[in-house]
Image (cartoon, rainbow, N blue to C red):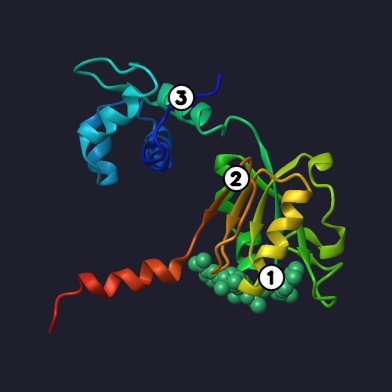
Amino acid sequence: MRYHKIPDETVRRLPIYLRGALHLSQQGVKGVSSQKLAGLLGVNSWQIRKDFSYFGDFGTPGVGYDTSTLIKHINRILNLDTVHKVALVGAGNLGSALLAFPGFEIYGFEIVAAFDSDKRKVGKKNSGVTVKDISDLCVLKDHGISMGIIAVPGDAAQDITDRLVNAGVRGILNFSPRYVVVPKRVKVITIDIAMDLARLPYYLPAG
Ligand code: NAI
């Protein structure tokens, strides 16, 4: 079953709740109240209750939520209850760090292919993944790859986006500092640490 009417803002918070629930589960905690979860994650308990109400009332009044049920529900809503194979484009500094990062596994993501245009990188292993020439990025869906990560310079981002879309990718995580255009059926999420950093000084006390 897929859930379609959950607001984007709630979807944005679900991975935060999932992280909290996984942490509690690893600690052997079987049940959690919205207040306890809120305290753990630094969010409002009413927000948690409102967000959870979008996918059914599975909490017990006065007791809270069963941790494993919570994990199961959120995983199902986010479509994380299956392994997602991911292709990375751009095996440079950032791409290499992403290939080496073990933290994707817990959500079922596997970077199974990496592509680059630099002949010195092609054919070499990077964190266990052999880097392929970008010209080989043709048909990813035949290999069960439905998601792509873009870690190339901004100038190459749209071209790489088009190639990923033509290869059958349906979701793109874009680290480049460019807005990329995709067909409606494809979802792009852009991550920009520099833009987040650029907001931070506004909050610093003067002096
Ligand atoms: P890098 O220069 O170390 O790596 C870029 C890689 O892309 C290189 O291996 C290069 O050969 C490859 N490449 C270039 N054009 C290509 C093409 N047309 N097809 C395939 N591969 C191609 O750069 P770095 O530091 O890894 O940054 C990569 C991108 O990520 C940049 O756009 C940078 O602005 C962005 N970035 C974003 C961050 C964020 O928070 N969103 C943080 C750090 C970097």
Write down the residue under mark 1. Answer: 156
Mark 2: amino acid: Glu
Write down the residue under mark 2. Answer: 105
Task: Between residue 7 and residue 102, name the one nearer to us.
Answer: 7
**Quarter of the figure that contains the C terminus:** bottom left
Frontmost of labels 2 and 1 is: 1
Task: Where is residue 197? Give x, y as percent.
Answer: 37, 71
Reply above or below: 104 against 204: above
Q: Secondary structure at mark 1?
A: helix
Mark 3: amino acid: His
* Quadrant of the image occupied by residue 92: bottom right
* Quadrant of the image occupied by residue 155: bottom right
* Quadrant of the image occupied by residue 117: bottom right
Instruction: Farthest residue to the bottom: give it.
Output: 207
Residues at circles 2 and 3 in contact by the CB criterion of under 8 Å: no
Is label 1's Cβ within 8 Å of ligand 1? yes
